[in-house]
Amino acid sequence: MSDGKKIKIKNPIKGVVSGELLFKTGVVQNLPFLLYVTLLMILYIAYGYYVDATVHQYSAEEKKSEELYSELQSLMEVYDQESLQSKIAADVQSLGLYESKYPPKVVWNEKKK
């Protein structure tokens, strides 16, 4: 206190229960500031939980992305093996199709419609 008064409370438990401690120490005058600081602390804690949840979600999505990329790579490998010219020729041979030994010829039509 700036005016040099000393606060004397005979029985501290009685002072807390009766509310005398709050009035004599100036807690009531500083109540808006204390509420403001309390609100800031609550917001800070809530923001911490929000960031923690966001980091966990990001980590889970990154792991899922890595798994999908791995699956894509393995499927691309299978596709590359299945799309080889020799593999396709062997697969369609059972249908009675065969690979031509001669290159295709271009036939030009002289008529214009």
Image (cartoon, grey):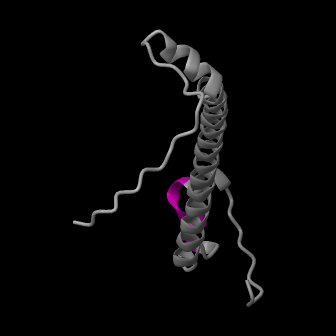
Taken as a whole, is the magenta stretch helix, strand or loop?
A: helix
In the picture as drawn, the residue positioned furthest to the bottom comes out as: 3
Residue 15 image offset from top left, x and y in percent: 59, 58
Q: Residue at x 62, y 54 (%)?
A: 51
In the image, 59 versus 54, the foreground residue is 59
User: How many numbered markers are drawn?
Assistant: 0
* Camera-nearest residue between 40 and 2: 40
Q: Quadrant of the N terminus?
A: bottom right
Q: x, y percentage for residue 45? A: 61, 56
The quarter of the rendered structure image containing the C terminus is bottom left
> 9 above or below 87?
below
Q: Is residue 20 magenta?
A: yes
Residue lying farthest to the left in this orientation: 113
Q: Nearer the viewer, residue 10 or 55?
A: 55
- Picture residue at 68% right of the left edge, 63% below the top: 9
Horizontal side of residue 23 vs 5, given as left or right: left
Q: Residue at x 58, y 68 (%)?
A: 40
Give, as a single range, the part of the protein colored magenta. Answer: 17-23
33 shown above or below 77: below
Q: Position of residue 109 (x, y in %)?
A: 34, 57
**To which quarter of the image does residue 68 belong?**
top right
